[in-house]
Image (cartoon, rainbow, N blue to C red):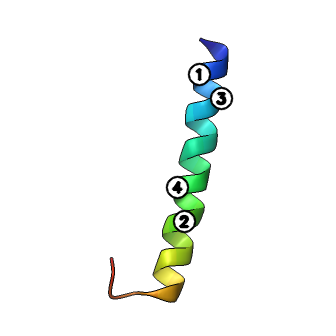
Amino acid sequence: MKQKNKTIGINMIIRDIIEVKAKEKEPILI
């Protein structure tokens, strides 16, 4: 259970970073 939560947290952080980079590169996309 604990490890699953950790993975979800990491995935959320990665997703956040990808979204920020996507916004910086292509503002039209979002």
Compute the Cα span from label 2 to label 3: 18 Å
Label 1 belongs to which residue?
4
Quadrant housing residue 20? bottom right
Horizontal arrangement in the rendering, residue 10 relative to residue 18 (left or right): right
**What amino acid does circle 1 point to?**
Lys
Task: Please say if the residues under marks 3 and 1 sit with CB atoms less than 8 Å apart.
Answer: yes
SS state under label 1? helix
**Residue 4 place in picture, x, y as percent:** 59, 21
Label 4 belongs to which residue?
15
Task: Please say if the residues under marks 3 and 4 sit with CB atoms less than 8 Å apart.
Answer: no
Q: Earlier in the sequence, mark 2 or mark 1?
A: 1
Tell me the tag on residue 18.
2
Quadrant housing residue 9? top right
**Can you say which quadrant of the picture contains the C terminus?**
bottom left
Label 3 belongs to which residue?
6
Q: Residue, x 43% and y 87% (percent of image)? A: 26
Horizontal arrangement in the rendering, residue 8 relative to residue 23 (left or right): right
**Residue 12 place in picture, x, y as percent:** 54, 46
**Residue 21 place in picture, x, y as percent:** 56, 75
Horizontal arrangement in the rendering, residue 30 relative to residue 25 (left or right): left
Task: Please say if the residues under marks 4 and 2 sit with CB atoms less than 8 Å apart.
Answer: yes
